[in-house]
Amino acid sequence: MHAGHQDEAPADIPAEPQPRQYVRTTGSVSRRMLLVAIAWILLLLVGGGYALDRVLVTTVTRNFDDQLDYVLKAMIFTAEIDSNGEVMNNRELADQRFLEYNSGAYWQISGKGHEPYIS
């Protein structure tokens, strides 16, 4: 063999180990757990907010409709038609809101060919 060839390694054995290539990962387990927890919290907050909105809207609407139904029934029970065919109440409604001027709560009975009967 030649003297210059003694420093060379055989072809099947690498001369120097190559530096190890690191694959970048998404992070530690704690980081992934934190991201999953944040996702769940956001999902539950959005879902809970929507559910709360639906419950409150339904409750307020039902309450308003029940009050309106109560007032309508009270108006029907106290209404009479006089000899001229006009609507009149035989007594005032018990709800004070209808008796006070500028209270914001008013009612009106109207029909074709008749003057409106208002609170």
Image: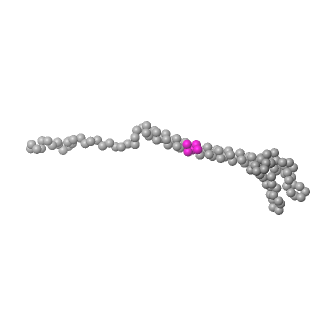
Expressed as whole percent of the image width and height from the top left, the position of residue 90 reads 87, 49
Q: Residue furthest front?
A: 101
Q: What residue span does the magenta drawing correspond to?
A: 45-49
User: Relative to 47, is 12 on the left or the right?
Assistant: left
- What colouring does the structure picture have? one colour
Q: Is residue 93 visible?
A: yes
Quadrant in the rendering for residue 28 = top left
Q: In the figure, residue 53 lies in which quadrant?
A: top right
Q: Residue furthest left?
A: 2
Q: Residue at x 9, y 42 (%)?
A: 3
Q: Is residue 64 magenta?
A: no
Q: Main secondary structure of the magenta part?
A: helix
Tell whether 65 sits left or right of 46: right
Location of the N terminus (image quadrant): top left
Residue with the most extreme right position: 83
- Locate residue 31 relative to residue 20 in the image: left or right: right
Q: Nearer the viewer, residue 79 or 37?
A: 79
Q: Position of residue 18 (x, y in %)?
A: 25, 42
> Which residue is found at the position 18% from the left and 44% from the top?
11
Residue at 71 percent across and 47 percent down: it is 64
x, y percent for residue 87: 85, 55
Whether 47 is among the magenta residues is yes
Q: Residue at x 12, y 44 (%)?
A: 5
Residue 33 position within the rendered picture, expressed as x and y whole percent measured from the top left: 45, 38
Q: Is residue 105 visible?
A: no
